[in-house]
Amino acid sequence: MELLEFEKPIVELEDELNLLKEKSVSQKIDLSGEISSIEEKLVETRRDIYDNLSPWQRVQIARHTKRPFMLDYVAKAFDHFTELHGDRILGDDHSMPGGFGTIAGQRCVVLGHQKGRDLKENLKRNFGSAHPEGYRKSLRLMQMAEKFSLPIVTLIDTPGAYPGIGAEERNIAEAIARNLREMMLLRVPIIAVVLGEGGSGGALGIGVADRVLMMENAYYSVISPEGCAAILWKHRKFAPEAAEAMKIAAPDLAKLGLIDGVIPEVPGGAHHDLGAAAMAFRSELVKRLEELKALPTADLLNQRYEKFRKFGEWTEA
């Protein structure tokens, strides 16, 4: 598994512990005291590191190549999923799959960003950066959900919408802007969950929701830390300082009231235990769906409108 820089002290202690255990068995020496001491130090080191993660360290976890992606959560947390394809205008976008799903007996429409595990899959998924067709397909599916009175679940995990010439020619800005407008008016519950990266308009294009949740080690930002550092500090090496200043991590966004909840992960991140992450994700999602289903449609739309109108408000002491 890919090792992150701040995790090296943990791995060094794990290696030391394994060597002691092997030596104890192979040479039949009682090293229980030393082993116990290393185990205690390992527990303490894990706690010190994982309980005090900086925003930049959370960004690194959010980008981990082994981190669960959208379809991993769909496979583990949903009871059934049938994918639908195409935007009915130009084509399909494999970086944004979507379709009908069932969770805890509730039928819904599920869509989101999907990254790849290797180069071949990343080329197919375009590294999780959707084209205009992806946003138009997602809007088609959401309008279908409204037609059949089904709640919508969007799963966000993208560094940003694809910024290439082809995407600009096919009007990526209009596709995202239309989604923002239409999602605000959809007469069914919408829940958005940021699984890993929540980058810029690419994330917001499916992020207008009644409840916005984040996995504990995800981030949500108008620009990447590297992009912000390049603008403000003139060099991307200041990305850690930018991540701290922008308040892009889930705990900070929850304190600011910009998201509605944080879904816990095991220490070190969801890639250490997909089962536990999917269970926490499913539990929170089912709870929020039940909460929103109880609201009359007029109240749902009013609350959604007020939620986004409040963003950016501030007071002076």
Image (cartoon, rainbow, N blue to C red):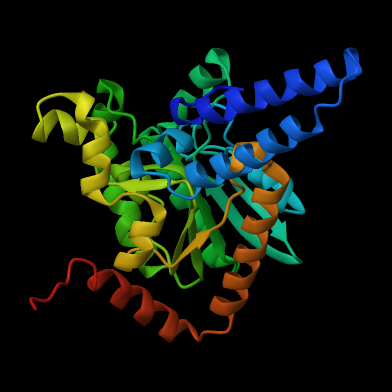
Q: Is residue 231 above or below residue 305?
A: above
Q: Nearer the viewer, residue 167 or 238?
A: 238
Residue sitting at x 42%, y 85%:
298
Residue 71 in sight from this viewpoint: no
| Quadrant showing the C terminus | bottom left
Report the number of discs: 0
Residue 216 in sight from this viewpoint: yes
| Quadrant showing the N terminus | top right
Residue 188 x/y as whole percent? 51, 71
Residue sitting at x 12%, y 76%:
315
Q: Is residue 271 above or below residue 126?
A: below
Q: Nearer the viewer, residue 40 or 31?
A: 31
Residue 119 x/y as whole percent? 53, 14
Residue sitting at x 40%, y 31%:
129
Residue 106 x/y as whole percent? 70, 67
Residue 161 x/y as whole percent? 34, 35
Q: Could you tell whether 149 is left or right of 237 in the image?
A: right
Q: Nearer the viewer, residue 315 or 81?
A: 315
Q: Is residue 58 above or below residue 125?
A: below
